Image (tube, grey):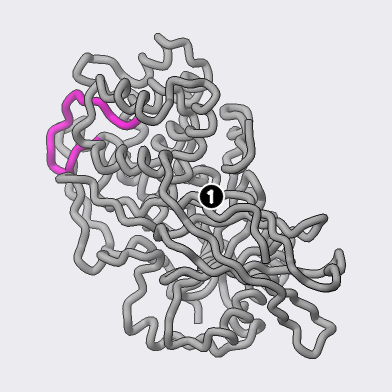
């Protein structure tokens, strides 16, 4: 199987075309599923079968080469799964990834002059590349596993709030609307709107002085952290170490699975495909997922394209919002200098932070039907945490000018209800 590209950014959302080297063309109604397998995570996506196969690569946790396998699914065949092609794809770190990591790791020591150096380094002064960079940096930051102690105010818990340049200041200086919206939904994001830097200028004043109408509208009417998918991505718990991600821009649903060498590889990959296929055929499920998108997102922010392109259901399944998550909890671990404290048990910090005993107890020898029973948990990454954190910070600042010490779970993804069986 030949792919149209050999490399994709670590945060994904890139379109890839595939050419199968098969003697006979595939029927147009054929269902093709793509499985990407890395060292710790695997992803399952349904491919679009038109003139050529096409699929959208999801974000990953490591810069590494992954295997790519295309499976043909047919309900009428004795053997429903057939591997029709294979290849390899490399996840790489690009400028957007570097900038996102810089804002997180150096968010506590930014200055008002940093924007010039960073602007030159990442070509943010060029109008032609700024729009694409805006979307890519937001995706990259949403894909990072940011420490629980990180906040947009760049102030550790217990430290007195003082004027300083925040990541939101930089987003406004560069005119990056997508990044600004993402930051507003993070802990301290709403308070950062009126936080002055060392020159006494707030992000709101910057937007007004620069005449940036979109950013001014965004800052004066900020998004609701409880109802805004970070960078347009919603996450849905399916079962144990399985996670569904929905991209609202492309309306692409991806199943991501944490690898376990103790599981039967072939049997469970087929079960994974059946799980994704079942969700894709559930119209009520998809309708409720699509409804999670911010209602005013297209009026406040122009709809962005993909990375590589220019300019309760019938069975009574419930959708529940998770109360405690990290910014995304998915992938690369970021340590934010002296302001971040990462527990030792989060060193791997892959995507689900499951305890070892949970993995040992977890049996994935179930059939596709068995694994689909039970509730599904839908959550917006870090949204509830962002709101609660902002409220606590605001109250604390009003009365004592100090941040409270908020104890958070060591696991970035803690279900309100027990995990599915």
In the image shown, does 256 or 3 lie closer to the viewer?
3
- From this view, report whether residue 74 is shown above or below residue 44: below
Which of the pair 313/41 is nearer the observer? Answer: 41
50 or 319, nearer to the observer: 50
What is the quadrant of residue 225 in the picture? top left
Identify which residue, 260 or 205, lies in the foreground.
260
Q: Position of residue 362 (x, y in %)?
A: 44, 85
Residue at image location 56% in from the left, 50% down from the top = 13
Q: Position of residue 234 (x, y in %)?
A: 54, 53
- Dot 1 crowding, Cα within 10 Å, few <14, some 14–19, many 20+: many
Residue placed under numbered mark 1 in the picture: 233
Q: Is residue 309 magenta-colored?
A: no
Residue occupying the point 25% across, 65% down: 347
- Using the image, determine if residue 26 lies above or below residue 180: below
Query: Do we see residue 278 in this rendering?
Result: no
Where residue 359 sits in the image (x, y, percent)? 39, 82
Compared across the picture, whether 7 is left or right of 282 comes to left
Q: Position of residue 302 (x, y in %)?
A: 61, 29
- Say which quarter of the image contains residue 153: top left
Find numbered disc 1 in the image and state the secondary structure of the residue it sits on: strand
Residue 17 seen in the figure: yes
Image: magenta residue range: 154-167
Q: Residue at x 49, y 27 (%)?
A: 130
The secondary structure that most of the magenta stretch takes on is: loop
């Amino acid at each position: 199987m030949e792919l149209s590209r050999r490399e994709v950014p670590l945060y994904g959302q890139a379109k890839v075309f595939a050419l199968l080297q098969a003697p006979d063309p595939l029927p147009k109604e054929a269902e093709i599923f793509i499985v990407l397998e890395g060292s710790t995570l695997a992803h399952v996506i349904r491919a679009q079968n038109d003139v050529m196969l096409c699929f959208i690569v999801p974000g990953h946790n490591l810069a590494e080469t992954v295997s790519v396998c295309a499976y043909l699914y047919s309900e009428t065949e004795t053997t429903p799964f057939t591997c029709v092609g294979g290849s390899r794809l490399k996840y790489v770190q690009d400028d957007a990834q570097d900038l996102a990591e810089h804002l997180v790791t150096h968010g506590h020591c930014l200055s008002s002059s940093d924007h010039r150096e960073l602007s030159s380094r990442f070509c943010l002064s060029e109008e032609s590349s700024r729009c694409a960079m805006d979307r890519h940096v937001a995706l990259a930051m949403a894909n990072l596993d940011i420490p629980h102690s990180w906040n947009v105010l760049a102030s550790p818990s217990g430290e007195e709030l003082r004027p300083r340049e925040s990541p939101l200041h930089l987003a406004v200086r560069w005119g990056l609307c997508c990044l600004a919206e993402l930051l507003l939904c993070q802990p301290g994001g709403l308070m950062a709107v009126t936080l002055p830097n060392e020159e006494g200028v707030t992000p709101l004043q910057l937007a007004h002085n620069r005449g940036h109408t979109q950013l001014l509208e965004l800052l004066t009417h900020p998004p609701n952290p409880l109802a805004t998918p970070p960078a347009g991505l919603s996450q849905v718990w399916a079962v144990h170490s399985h996670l569904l991600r929905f991209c609202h821009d492309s309306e692409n649903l991806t199943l991501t699975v944490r690898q376990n060498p103790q599981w039967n590889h072939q049997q469970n990959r087929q079960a994974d495909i059946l799980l994704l296929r079942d969700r894709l055929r559930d119209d009520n499920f998809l309708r409720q997922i699509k409804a999670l998108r911010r209602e005013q997102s297209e009026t406040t922010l122009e709809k962005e394209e993909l990375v590589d392109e220019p300019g309760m259901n019938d069975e009574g399944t419930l959708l529940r919002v998770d109360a405690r998550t990290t910014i995304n909890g998915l992938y690369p671990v970021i340590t934010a200098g002296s302001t971040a404290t990462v527990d030792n048990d989060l060193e791997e910090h892959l995507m689900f932070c499951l305890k070892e005993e949970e993995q040992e107890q977890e049996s994935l020898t179930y059939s596709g039907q068995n694994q689909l029973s039970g509730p599904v948990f839908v959550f917006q990454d870090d949204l509830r945490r962002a709101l609660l954190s902002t409220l606590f910070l605001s109250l604390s600042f009003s009365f004592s000018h100090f941040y409270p010490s908020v104890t958070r779970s060591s696991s970035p993804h803690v279900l309100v209800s027990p995990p599915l069986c």
